[in-house]
Image: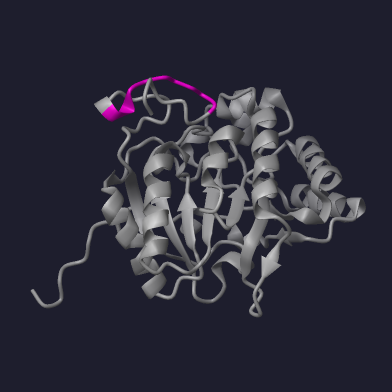
Amino acid sequence: MKGGCRLCPRECGVNRADGQLGYCRMPAKPHAARAALHYWEEPCISGKEGSGTVFFSGCTLRCVFCQNHIIAEGKAGGEISRERLTEIFLELQEQGANNINLVTAGHFLPSVSWAIRRAKEAGLQIPVVYNTGGYEKADVLKRLMGVIDIWLPDYKYRSSRLAERYSHAADYPKRAEEALAEMVRQAGPPVFDRRGMMQRGVIVRHLVLPGCIYDSKDVLEYLHDTWGEQIWVSIMSQYTPLPHVRAFPELNRKLTEEEYKEVVDYARFLGMKQVYIQEGACVGESFIPSFDGWGVQKPPDKDA
């Protein structure tokens, strides 16, 4: 990050290596709030064994409705070294994880990329998932060629107005479109193993927001018309109105079954076949992990 940090579209230009904080509110060294098996991703990611998920602190978006707002705002998690991050990846593999799942890692990209490469040299064999809000710079993602196997981006909005109101990023649609093109280029067509677990490919997530059905339809139409069967799409119903969203009355309610059904029906109308949908039981704070530092620090030596 010589000359200032420009890893994300915010391009704050601050010297994070010297402790300055930009939009992500994080210094240069990695900070993580949880590293554990996670069972609530898409079936081809979690499977029965779980996804080896590392939740990084800070975020370049900080959406007003974020269910992980505690870590997105940098209020949870601690600093770890690149070497410790390498160990975490290998520990998750030893626990039987189907993959390594990097959640919101873009603002720590140099360290994360280094740690993944070292872990692969040390025996990491499971796929690596890049789990992102979609607000990325395509030229930065090019540095991950050969490092990432599965891309799991959000595509939150087609409307710049909604992107500005809820994520303070009017350029989100353009940036997400460019980033997705780079992800598809690197991943190639979807590849699954005999168990149905994804080994390579792209799954685009879209969270349906209350009152924003028109934009959800625009998102699905764009994804289908542009990428067809080169990607999978996950239509998410799990929107949960947490207390911090009260400043946005239109979002201060749950998504109705009718709203979600309308979006799913539109996907069917478009002829989309590679789609994951969610049941209503996925809604609620009980599905939000505890960001208590689990798995982040090195476990004590059993022989000590």
Q: Is residue 272 above or below residue 216?
A: below
Magenta stretch: dominant secondary structure = loop
Which residue is at the front of the view, 173 or 277?
173
Q: Residue at x 40, y 41 (%)?
A: 110
Residue 226 coordinates in the image, percent (x, y): 82, 43
Q: Residue at x 66, y 58 (%)?
A: 201
Query: What segment is highlighted magenta in the picture?
Result: 9-17
> Which quarter of the rendering shows the C terminus?
bottom left
* Residue 152 horizontal/vertical position (percent): 60, 52
Residue 247 shown left or right of residue 123 in the figure: right
Q: Total of numbered circles in the picture?
A: 0
Quarter of the image with the N terminus is top left
Colouring scheme, one of rainbow, by chain, secondary structure, one colour? one colour
Answer whether residue 155 is visible to the viewer in this image.
Answer: no
Query: x and y percent of residue 141 in the render?
Result: 56, 40
Q: Nearer the viewer, residue 254 or 20?
A: 20
The answer to which image quadrant residue 59 occupies is top left
Query: In the depicted view, which residue is nearer to us: 262 or 57?
Result: 57
Farthest residue to the front: give it. 121
Which residue corresponds to the image point at 50% horizontal and 58% vertical from the top-left? 287
- In the rendered image, the vertical position of residue 6 relative to residue 147, given as above or below: above
Tell whether position 127 is magenta: no
Q: Is residue 247 something that shows in the picture?
A: yes
Q: Quadrant of residue 27?
A: top left
For this view, does 120 lie left or right of residue 146? left
Left or right, 174 with respect to 269, comes to left
Residue 247: x percent and y percent?
53, 27
Q: Is the residue 28 above or below the residue 279 in the image?
A: above
